[in-house]
Structure formats: C-alpha cells, structure tokens
Image: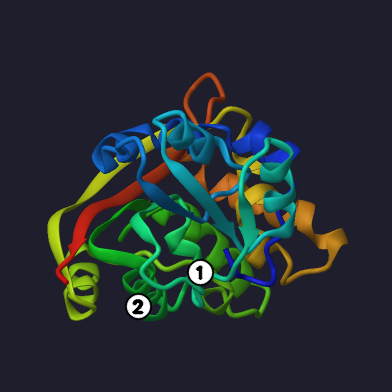
C-alpha cells in the first residue's frame, strides 16, 4: 500500500473494515500452506492473516508499506517489515508469496510481479486476491463525479489498479509464471458500519482533494448518489466488491 494520500489507523480499520481479513480465508485455502514453508505475506496489514499462516506451521514474513500497520502487526509478535511492494528486496527466499486485498494499491504491477518472481524459490507459487475490474465501480463513479462537479479531476484522484483476468494473466506469464487459476468473483459485501466509514477508511485519495471543512459535504453527496443501489430499506450499506483471485507457479 503505497499511495501517499492514504493513511492507515488500525483501530478504525478494524471497526470499518474488519471483514477484509475474514473474507480472505478462501485465498488462504487456495494457497494450501504446508508446515515448514517460508511465506511472504505481501500487504500484510495489521497481521490477521499473517498470524493464521503461522498457525499452519509456516515461517511467515509480513510486508506492508504502512508503518502504522507494521507497528500493529509487530505488537502481535509477527515478523512484519515496512517494505514497498514495488521494490521487494528478496531473492529466492520464499516457497510462496501470499497477498489479500493489497495488490490493487500497488499501481505498478509489473514491478510488483517481477519482485515476487525474484523473491520466490524455483517452483514457488504466487497466490492472491485483490480488487478486479469493476471493483467498487458504483462507489468510484460517485466519488469521481463529485470531484468533477467541483472542477477537480476525479479520475486523477483514483488510487487503485483493478485489472481484468486476461490482462493480469498476461503480466504473470510475461514474468515467467504459469497460471493455474484466475477469475473475477463478484462479492457484494455488507459493511459493518456504514458507507461513510468505508469512504473515510479507503477513499482518502479522493477526500483529500478538498479541504477538511469541505469533506463532510463531499461524503454526503457521494452517499446520496449511491444510496439507491447500495443501501437497503433498513439503512444497511453494501459495497459493490469484485475480486480477482489467482494461483500461479514460478516455472523455473
């Protein structure tokens, strides 16, 4: 997670987005960790899934660009390090690289994939899930339109990379991976608090384009624009998530 507009606070993240690691368990199953393996958790956040991987008997290194998240992960006794995912410093060190809900924050995917390939031992595997094409599409449209109406460039504020399966598979194969599986998974996700909490947690790149005094009005405008599709009759909010999940093997 490298966007300079985005700041993470572990308490707020757990309150508004605690579902993120919990919904990452299917990708842990796809990884199929084996006791004794050395695994890199790329974009480890506050370490919830890192801890789960340790429970399989693996040696796990957590990497995240957020000092706040890494500090929280270390309080759990985890080997967590502040590392930019675009510049991984490892060579032939890991049996697997795992990532959940992080690769869409890394907007130079070729650099990320090349670093993963270097970090893996021969025949190592890369298993991940992140935002794919169409992810939070309705929310993004609302945010971009709200900024455009203020004379700002909404698309330029978008901090995310949401690829199609075909485009990402091509990048993996160009870096020497064989793709075992890759698919888009629509996953409408009920929010534990509300859409305003989601926006303040994840959409800071958009919100920071206006003054702090203007942000409540911007948020209210976005909420009004997406409510018909993303809020039910009882006031419960759902985010229009679409995930890209894949498993790939280094071919040498």
Q: Is residue 131 visible?
A: no
Where does the image place residue 122, in percent across and percent down from the top left?
Answer: 23, 66
- Residue holding disc 1: 85
Would you place residue 105 above or below residue 95 in this image? below
Q: Nearer the viewer, residue 1 or 67?
A: 67
Disc tally is: 2
Where does the image place residue 159, in percent across and percent down from the top left?
Answer: 54, 69
Q: Nearer the viewer, residue 144 or 51?
A: 51
Q: Nearer the viewer, residue 32 or 217?
A: 32
Q: Residue at x 41, y 39 (%)?
A: 58
Where does the image place residue 226, in percent across and percent down from the top left?
Answer: 50, 46
Query: Dot 1 surroundings within 10 Å: few (below 14), some, or many (20 or more)?
Result: many
Image colouring: rainbow
- Residue holding disc 2: 114
Would you place residue 29 above or below residue 249 in this image? above
Q: Residue at x 34, y 72 (%)?
A: 113
Image quarter of the N terminus: bottom right
């Amino acid at each position: 997670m490298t966007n300079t507009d985005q700041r993470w606070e572990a308490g707020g993240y757990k309150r508004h987005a605690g579902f993120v690691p919990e919904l990452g368990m299917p990708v842990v199953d796809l990884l199929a960790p084996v006791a004794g393996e050395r695994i890199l958790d790329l974009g480890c956040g506050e370490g919830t899934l890192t801890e789960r991987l340790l429970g399989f008997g693996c040696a796990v290194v957590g990497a995240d660009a957020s000092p706040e998240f890494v500090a929280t992960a270390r309080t759990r006794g985890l080997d967590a390090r502040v590392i930019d995912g675009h510049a991984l410093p490892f060579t032939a060190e890991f049996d697997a690289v795992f990532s959940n809900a992080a690769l869409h924050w890394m907007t130079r995917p070729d650099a990320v994939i090349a670093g993963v390939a270097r970090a893996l031992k021969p025949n190592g595997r890369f298993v991940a899930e992140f935002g794919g094409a169409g992810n939070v599409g309705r929310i993004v449209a609302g945010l971009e339109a709200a900024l455009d109406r203020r004379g700002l460039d909404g698309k330029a504020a978008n901090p995310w990379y949401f690829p199609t399966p075909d485009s990402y598979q091509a990048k993996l194969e160009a870096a020497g991976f064989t793709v075992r599986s890759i698919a888009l998974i629509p996953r409408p996700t009920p929010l534990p608090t509300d859409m305003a909490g989601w926006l303040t947690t994840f959409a800071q790149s958009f919100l920071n384009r206006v003054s702090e005094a203007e942000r409540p009005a911007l948020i209210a405008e976005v909420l009004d624009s997406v409510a018909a599709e993303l809020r039910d009759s009882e006031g419960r909010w759902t985010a229009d998530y679409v995930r890209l999940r894949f498993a790939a093997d280094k071919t040498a």
